[in-house]
Structure formats: C-alpha cells, structure tokens
Amino acid sequence: MICIHQVLEKKPTRIKNFGIWVRYDSRSGTHNMYREYRSLSVAEAVTLCYRDMAARHRARANSVQIMRVEEVAASKCRRDHVKQFHDSSIRFPLPHRVVKSQFKSKIVAKRPNTFF
C-alpha cells in the first residue's frame, strides 16, 4: 500500500445512486454480485454494502471485495428498491398522529382519534 486518500464528494448534500460490484467468499464458494444503493457519498454507500452483505449473506468484511463503485444515473438503475424513490412526487404520509394540545384535558373518557 503506497498511500490512502479519502474521496470527497462534489455535491455532498445531493443524494445519488451507486452501483457496487462485489466479490465475496461464502461457505460454498466465491460469488460475484452487483448491488445498488442510494446514498450521499461513495464511502457511505460502501459502508451500506458491507453491512448489507453481513446481514443478508453472513459475509464477514474480510471475505468481501469491492471491485468497482460507480454513480448510476436514474434511468440506468436496475433494482426496484432503488427505483421506487425516483418519483418526483413521492410522499411519506404520517399515519396515527396524536395531536398534543396544552389546552385539552389530559384525562378523557374516550380513546384518542389518530386518523386524520
């Protein structure tokens, strides 16, 4: 190893799609994979990949090799769990909210209504 450089992002506040090519050793052999992640930086996407490989495939960090990392355009994404966030009119509703008011009584005879 000659030197180590941390790669800084040009736009660290913009979320991007990253494609990661991975090779890992399992109990049955060596496998190649392509995985996609949405993240703010390359380093965060690689960290997500290591955690995902450990969770889904029980692969330790020393058995996982990151072959290549690229930023992927939205039109070139393959995975559905990444493509579902490409909708510009996406909404995240907040169901079961309890309205807190300082003027309402804390003790009432009925359950609170949480559907609005």
Image: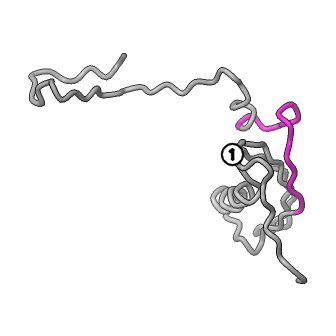
User: Disc 1 designates what residue?
Assistant: 13
The residue located at (87%, 51%) in the rendering is 70
Query: What range of the chain is rendered magenta?
Result: 67-81
* Location of residue 112 with respect to 34 vertically, above or below: above
Task: Tell me how the rendering is colored.
Answer: one colour
Residue type (three-letter) at the residue carrying disc 1: Thr
* Location of residue 98 with respect to 15 vertically, above or below: above
Residue at the farthest front position = 10
Q: How far from the left and from the top, in percent, is residue 62?
A: 75, 75
Q: How far from the left and from the top, in percent, is residue 43?
A: 74, 60
Q: How far from the left and from the top, in percent, is residue 69?
A: 86, 55
Q: With 103 as the anchor, is 33 left or right in this view?
A: right
* Location of residue 5 with respect to 83 vertically, above or below: below
Front residue of this view, candidates 11 and 70: 11
Residue 71 falls within the magenta-colored stretch: yes
The crowd level at tag 1 (other Cα within 10 Å; few <14, some 14-19, many 20+) is few
The residue located at (69%, 45%) in the rendering is 13
Q: With 103 as the anchor, is 45 left or right in this view?
A: right
The residue located at (22%, 23%) in the rendering is 112
